[in-house]
């Protein structure tokens, strides 16, 4: 594939389709891998790809997880659709091949509520200790206040870790109780923040940074905190709190969705809260809820309180 074709395709993805940086990065990785494969097979131009070469590539990437395979194939489909639309190829090779990757349905992992309570209790106790005992009081209070605010927001709103890392101060209104988020697909949504402890955690952190605009969560160099830093922070605190369960930022999102559903919150509201473009994505939490219902009924049903006694 010529550099001109690459630039043209990515210009289309970035400026015409308005794809996110994360998606563009994945596209670049997948297309580079495909180019390396066809080069090894003696094909210099992606426009010369036929169904046999494409089948060979799909066979080659079967070492990856099904979800990754689907993404890599989707990337190539987007590329070849573009080339066909721009008349750079006569026939899209995907029109001559059918690909069906079975990913299976993996239920989202959630955090035990007892572990969430344990984690928050540990952090608030640590903050209280620092407030009276830290020799480097200003920095340690900044750090623990920031980390508490991040965890309160993740659990309180169900945000993606990327969304939490990109919150801007000017998009927060604690008086009226909402945060404006720029989410997946560059779509804006407004998240309610009703709990007073979440608001208080954000206010405490804001008092430490004393800024009125820009990214909310900063690192020690005063730059925007990275998603990886948030993941590392959660792992560190979970270990310090002696929590055995492996915890990731995304598990807070799964947990709040599941708990809201268990408490009778309408699934359409949960879809809006999480920023899912399709209700089908949100409905996976119904399966988790059904399992919880079965456990509750099996344990709590009054029929278990009596036995049939023969007359």
Image (cartoon, rainbow, N blue to C red):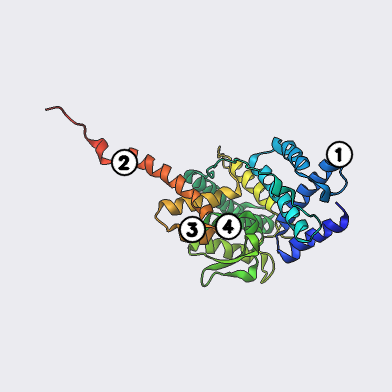
In space, the residues marked 4 and 3 are separated at their CA atoms by 12 Å
Q: Which residue is disc 1 drawn over?
A: 40
Q: Mark 2 touching mark 3, by CB under 8 A?
A: no
Instruction: Specify which label sits upstream in the sequence, 2 or 3.
Output: 3
| Relative image position of residue 91 (x, y in whole percent) | 76, 52
Judged from the image, the secondary structure of the residue bearing numbered disc 1 is helix
Q: Is residue 72 visible?
A: no
| Relative image position of residue 72 (x, y in whole percent) | 71, 46
Q: Which residue is disc 2 drawn over?
A: 300
What's the residue at 52%, 60% (across, down)?
A: 273
Instruction: Specify which label sits upstream in the sequence, 3 or 1.
Output: 1
In space, the residues marked 4 and 2 are separated at their CA atoms by 33 Å
Judged from the image, the secondary structure of the residue bearing numbered disc 3 is helix
Instruction: Specify which label sits upstream in the sequence, 1 or 2.
Output: 1
| Relative image position of residue 49 (x, y in whole percent) | 80, 46
**How dense is the environment of label 3, judged by Cα within 10 Å: few (below 14), some, or many (20 and up)?**
many
Judge depth for marks 4 and 3 and give the one in front: 3
Q: Please give the label number shown on residue 270.
A: 3
Q: Mark 1 touching mark 4, by CB under 8 A?
A: no
Q: Please give the label number shown on residue 146.
A: none
In space, the residues marked 2 and 3 are separated at their CA atoms by 27 Å
Judge depth for marks 2 and 3 and give the one in front: 3
Of 54 and 172, nearer the camera is: 54
Q: Which residue is disc 4 drawn over?
A: 159
Q: Mark 3 touching mark 1, by CB under 8 A?
A: no
**How dense is the environment of label 2, judged by Cα within 10 Å: few (below 14), some, or many (20 and up)?**
few
Judged from the image, the secondary structure of the residue bearing numbered disc 4 is loop
**How dense is the environment of label 4, judged by Cα within 10 Å: few (below 14), some, or many (20 and up)?**
many
In space, the residues marked 1 and 2 are separated at their CA atoms by 63 Å
């Amino acid at each position: 594939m010529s550099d001109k074709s690459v630039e043209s395709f990515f210009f289309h993805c970035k400026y015409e389709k308005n794809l996110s940086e994360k998606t563009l990065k994945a596209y670049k990785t997948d297309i580079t891998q495909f180019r390396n494969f066809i080069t090894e097979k003696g094909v210099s131009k992606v426009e010369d790809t036929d169904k046999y070469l494409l089948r060979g590539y799909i066979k080659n990437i079967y070492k990856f997880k099904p979800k990754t395979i689907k993404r890599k194939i989707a990337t190539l489909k987007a590329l070849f659709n573009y080339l066909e639309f721009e008349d750079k190829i006569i026939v899209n090779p995907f029109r001559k091949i059918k690909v069906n990757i079975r990913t299976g349905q993996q239920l989202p992992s959630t955090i035990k509520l007892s572990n969430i309570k344990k984690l928050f209790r540990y952090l608030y106790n640590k903050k209280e200790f620092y407030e009276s005992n830290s020799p480097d009081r200003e920095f340690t209070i900044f750090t623990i206040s920031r980390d508490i605010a991040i965890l309160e927001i993740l659990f309180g709103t169900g945000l993606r870790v990327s969304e939490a890392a990109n919150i801007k101060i000017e998009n927060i209104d604690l008086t009226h109780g909402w945060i404006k988020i720029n989410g997946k697909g560059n779509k804006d949504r407004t998240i309610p923040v009703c709990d007073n402890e979440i608001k208080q955690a954000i206010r405490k952190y804001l008092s430490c940074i004393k800024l009125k605009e820009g990214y909310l969560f900063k690192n020690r160099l005063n730059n925007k905190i990275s998603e990886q830093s948030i993941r590392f922070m959660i792992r560190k605190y979970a270990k310090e709190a002696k929590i055995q369960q492996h915890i990731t930022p995304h598990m807070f999102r799964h947990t709040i969705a599941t708990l809201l559903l268990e408490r009778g919150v309408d699934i359409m509201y949960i879809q809006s809260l999480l920023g899912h473009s399709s209700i089908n994505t949100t409905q996976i939490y119904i399966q988790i809820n059904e399992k919880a219902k079965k456990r509750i009924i099996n344990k709590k049903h009054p029929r278990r309180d009596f036995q049939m006694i023969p007359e």
